[in-house]
Image (cartoon, helix red, strand yellow):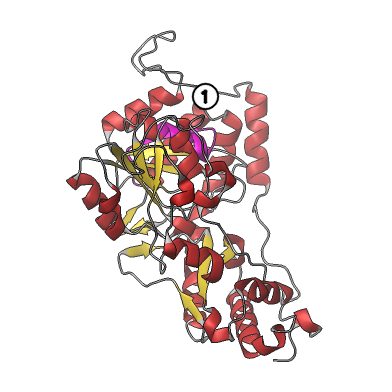
């Protein structure tokens, strides 16, 4: 295999992976037609997108909003989360999963993840429930569905709403059904890196009529569909999507299913190849995961198999081989933003026994995954050929074989 690139050897791969976003005349024409229509907001394109995306995600109700963070806030409000309520969230996720709870007046309660899925551990949820708990957010991290059987069962047992944070999971399938509409509500993001991309944008989906109607009201200034223009039933806000975003999303939906199938095939192939490398562990197989959307391909690096080599050095070596990769998240409760004071969370918490203090939180599986194990590859790297996937595995094997070279760097 030769010397590692990081120590002066030749790279495993010198060409680029597929570019993202993928676009062409279809997207250009959609934007020009919207511009020339003179209808740039609250029009037919938004209606068409809501119908199309709701149907794609097996959801009866779909409300298009301006971004994924707004989708989470709208879903929380529609599910009845009020100031002072506790909401259970995993700490291995983008900050919006938890910050959206704070922005609606709630208290995020962090519960650890399963290390072999990086998703919320349903076995640990029940112990975090108190008299203040109102909802659970199950994040489908990287596009892999969380254990909705276990999480929804706990929610139903305790009368809690369950929200699916599916912002990375367009087209993911749990037990034959698309995610988002399986629990009480689901949220999606169409930010620039996402598998369905309009630069920004989001959606709330649900198969619960009451929640769907409330979400529509909260996103549209508190209006109701059957009311007058200046008739407001709840204190909503303007979270609406623009016609330009909707037009772009309608165009981007056309290749979405084919792209999703390509990612699935290449992700599965990469799993097969990486399972042959000592010291690399892929996410746990689960027959209930009908399809992983692979917004991220996450694998676990085991330092002990690499002679104790820190993950940071492994990532540097793999990146030098022409395989862009990253370490991913830090535990959310360790982010400076969550060194909170009563200015941000003025309510006492039953779970935290009074004033919220995230400095006392410890989620060992999340901390181990973040510090030592998780390595990320982005979704565009799975949009190419089998040869692209083989290059990734070849580079990982090369670093494994030559890991002794890295100890002195």
The residue located at (64%, 31%) in the rendering is: 33
Query: Is residue 263 at all visible to an observer of this figure?
Result: no
Q: Quadrant of residue 124?
A: bottom left
Q: Quadrant of residue 13?
A: bottom right
Q: Position of residue 6 (x, y in %)?
A: 76, 79
Q: Residue most toward the left?
A: 157
**Element under disc 1:** loop
Q: Residue at x 56, y 50 (%)?
A: 194
Image quadrant where one finds the N terminus: bottom right
x then y, percent, for residue 266: 52, 71
Magenta run includes residue 251: no
Q: Residue at x 51, y 35 (%)?
A: 341
Image point (64%, 76%), residue name: 314
Q: Nearer the viewer, residue 409 or 121?
A: 409
Q: Nearer the viewer, residue 91 or 75?
A: 91
* Residue 11 placement: quadrant: bottom right
Category of crowding for the residue at label 1, using alpha-carbon neighbours closer than 10 angstroms: few (below 14), some (14–19), many (at least 20): few
User: Compared with residue 168, is residue 248 higher up or lower down, i.e. above or below?
Assistant: above
Whether residue 60 is in magenta: the answer is yes
Residue 211 position in % (x across, y down): 31, 31
Q: Which residues are magenta?
A: 58-74
| Residue 152 appears left or right of 379 | left
Q: Nearer the viewer, residue 138 or 199?
A: 138
- The reply, left or right, for residue 125 in relation to residue 33 is left
Residue position for label 1: 43
Is residue 10 shown above or below 365?
A: below
């Amino acid at each position: 295999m030769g010397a590692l690139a990081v120590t002066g050897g030749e790279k495993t791969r010198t060409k680029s992976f597929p570019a993202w976003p993928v676009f062409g005349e279809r997207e250009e024409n959609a934007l020009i037609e919207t511009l020339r229509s003179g209808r740039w907001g609250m029009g037919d394109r938004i209606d068409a997108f809501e119908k199309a995306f709701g149907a794609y995600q097996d959801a009866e109700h779909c409300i298009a909003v301006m971004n994924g963070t707004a989708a989470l806030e709208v879903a929380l409000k529609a599910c009845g989360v009020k100031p002072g309520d506790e909401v259970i969230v995993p700490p291995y996720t983008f900050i919006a999963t938890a910050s959206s709870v704070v922005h609606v007046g709630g208290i995020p309660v962090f519960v650890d993840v399963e290390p072999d899925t990086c998703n919320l551990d349903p076995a640990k949820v029940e112990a975090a429930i108190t008299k203040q708990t109102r909802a659970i957010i199950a994040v489908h991290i990287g596009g892999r569905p969380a254990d909705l059987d276990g999480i929804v069962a706990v929610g139903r047992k305790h009368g809690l709403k369950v929200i699916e944070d599916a912002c990375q999971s367009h087209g993911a399938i749990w037990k034959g059904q698309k995610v988002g509409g399986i629990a009480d509500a689901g949220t999606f993001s169409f930010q620039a890196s996402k598998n369905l991309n309009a630069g920004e944008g989001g959606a709330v989906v649900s198969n619960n009529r009451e929640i769907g109607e409330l979400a529509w009201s909260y996103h549209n200034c508190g209006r109701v569909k059957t009311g007058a223009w200046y008739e407001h039933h709840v204190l909503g806000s303007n979270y609406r999507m623009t016609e330009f975003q909707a037009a772009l999303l309608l165009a981007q939906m056309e290749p979405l299913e084919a792209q999703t199938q390509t990612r699935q095939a290449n992700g599965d192939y990469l799993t097969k190849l990486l399972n042959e490398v000592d010291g690399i562990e892929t996410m746990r197989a689960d027959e209930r995961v009908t399809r992983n959307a692979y917004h991220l391909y996450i694998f676990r690096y085991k330092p002990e198999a690499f002679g104790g080599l820190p993950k940071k050095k492994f990532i540097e070596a793999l990146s030098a081989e022409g395989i862009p990769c990253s370490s991913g998240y830090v535990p959310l409760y360790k982010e400076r933003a969550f060194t909170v004071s009563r200015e941000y969370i003025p309510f006492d918490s039953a779970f935290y026994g009074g004033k919220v203090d995230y400095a006392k939180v410890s989620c060992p599986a999340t901390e181990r995954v973040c510090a030592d194990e998780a390595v990320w590859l982005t979704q565009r790297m799975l949009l190419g050929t089998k040869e692209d996937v083989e290059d990734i595995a070849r580079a990982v094997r090369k670093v494994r074989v030559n890991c002794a070279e890295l100890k002195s760097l």
